[in-house]
Each structure stands twice: as structure tokens, then as C-alpha cells.
Amino acid sequence: MNTIKVQPVRDLRVDFARWAVAQTPKVRTCSTSEFAVPPQLFTHMPERLLVGSVVDGHPYVSPAGDETPEPLTTIPGEPLPPVPDFAYPPGAVPLPEQERQLATTSPATADAAMTAVLVAADLAATNHEQPAGAAPLEGEGAAITCDVCGRPFGTPRGRDTHRRQAHPEA
């Protein structure tokens, strides 16, 4: 069946969905942000639901010649356009330079950095392992070592978890 793919403006998605489920048969979605509208229903849709939408990959142009807002398009990895001053609430404080630089880091780099930090924190929290090259642990449990490889651990639980994961045959 031939359909017209309509990606409504974010502000009109709920209204568009209400219209879509009120049809017989219901208009279905074809992606997380697009609806597959049959051609016979497209010609009878309320104009207000189409203003600003993307229809079959092209911005909707009203037959009445009304101005339609240009949809916001961004390029992955490129910085976003500057935010106008009126968008900030009164008394807003700008970010320090270091945080501002982190905020403009590419999404892939930020994702990789956060994943590395979370994995390291998770390993340290669950295994209570001592990082490589660190001084020997002091206090209770300082002498807890893996009897297969000799690696030191802070708790018996950390050693046992290591043993199960690193030496399953032992």
C-alpha cells in the first residue's frame, strides 16, 4: 500500500496522533517520529497539523502560500547555533569555561568518555579491586590475594568475583 510519510512538528505530535487514531482505519506510525498517512486521508487532513511538518522528506508547503517555519536541522558533531539571551531566565549564570568546553565536545567523544568513567567506577565499586600500579592496600584485608595470579584485593568478595571471572577453570 502506498503511503505518505509525515513527520509532524514536535509541538503538534500529540494533536497529530489524536487525529491519526480517530481515523478509520487508524493511521499508523512508520518510525519513532513519522506517521504513514494513506493518500486519500492526506488530502483531507487539517492544515494546522501539517504546518511546519516534513512530508516525504520535504518541508510542507501550504497550498494557500502561508509561510511555514523552517524545521530545525542539525549536523551531528557540529556545534548548535547560539541560544538568544531572551531564552535564559532572569539571573541565569553562564557556565565556567571548562564546563562550557565539555558541553561543546562531540557527542561521540563525550559518550566514550562517560562510558569509560562509568565502567571504571562500576568495576572499582563491585570488585573493590586495587588499580594497577597503586600502593598495596592497608588495614583490614590488605593481604587478600588471588591464589592463582597473586593479584591483591581489598575484600574477599572482590577476590572471589575476580577468581570466577578471570580464572573460571580454577
Image (cartoon, helix red, strand yellow):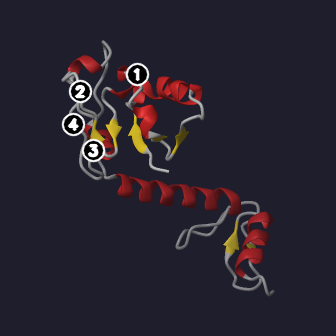
Amino acid type, label 1 = Pro
Proximity of marks 4 and 2: CB atoms separated by less than 8 Å: no
When the figure is inspected, residue 52 is found, relative to residue 4, above or below; the finding is: above
Dot 4 falls on a residue whose secondary structure is: loop
Q: Mark 4, mark 2: which one is toward the viewer?
A: 2
Q: Position of 121 compared to 113: left or right?
A: right
Q: Residue 48: horizontal and vertical position, in percent? A: 36, 20
Q: Quadrant of residue 8?
A: top left
Proximity of marks 4 and 3: CB atoms separated by less than 8 Å: no
Amino acid type, label 4 = Pro
Q: Which residue is mark 4?
A: 81
Q: Residue at x 79, y 64 (%)?
A: 157
Q: Which mark is residue 46?
A: 1
Amino acid type, label 3 = Thr
Dot 1 falls on a residue whose secondary structure is: loop
> Alpha carbon of mark 4 to alpha carbon of mark 3: how far?
9 Å
